[in-house]
Amino acid sequence: MSNVPELVLETMKSAEARGFKLSCEETVGRLLAALASAVPPGGRVLELGTGAGVGAAWLASGLGHRSDATVLTLERDPELAATARELPWPEWVEVRVADVEKELPELGRFDLIFADAEGGKWSGLDLTVAALRPSGMLVVDDMDLSRYQSTEHRESVTRVRDSILSDPRLVAVDLPVSSGIMVATKRHD
């Protein structure tokens, strides 16, 4: 892995040390960093599903040394959130323990959302789309059906894909790379 930001390397080491194997893949991370770099001044970034913090580290790295934007990452598992909080985050990154579907309606609007948890992606997707600002971008990974053996999981992924592609509020693309990535932009009302 060449040119991987230091914060990402630290989160990857932490994830590996704890045996956490569900971190976002490098291609997804690089996409997140690229999209985060375009967040406007005063912008807000949200990650649903912190895990060990790798996705949040890519998002923060994309923002660079900007202090005019914020990253909020939500994790329902208190132990995973505690692990992520141990990392050397910039002061404008917040790791919060939360039930995504309960918190999301109260969080306001975001310029970029990475939906990487069941809550907000497999269920509550409408809440996630509603939390996007006009021109806000949504990234959803783990959409490659071949990764799932369970009929239930395959149906959930298909439902999410179909919802994103058919939502009139969104302009979306399904990218068959890495773990399967979808990117959508929210239309102006």
Image: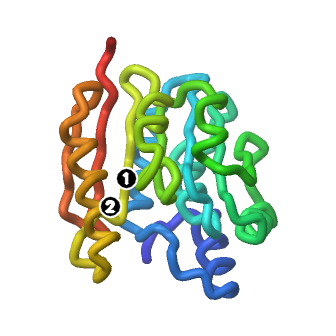
Pointer 1 or 2: first along the chain: 1
Kindly identify the amino acid type of the residue bearing the numbered disc 1: Val
Answer left or right for 147 relative to 57: left
Residue 15 position (above or below residue 82): below
Q: Residue at x 73, y 40 (%)?
A: 92
In the shown orientation, is residue 58 left or right of residue 137?
right
Residue at the front extreme of this rendering: 152
Residue under the image location 20 percent in, 41 percent down: 165
Which label is found at residue 140?
1
Give amino acid for label 2. Answer: Ser
Residue 87 occupies which quadrant of the picture? bottom right
Tag count = 2
Marker disc for residue 156 = 2
Marks 1 and 2, Cα distance to the nearest angstrom? 13 Å
Q: Vertically, is 47 above or below 39?
A: below
> How many residues crowd mark 2 within 10 Å: few (<14), some (14–19), many (20+)?
some
Quadrant of the rendering where the C terminus is positioned? top left
The x and y percentages for residue 136 are: 41, 29
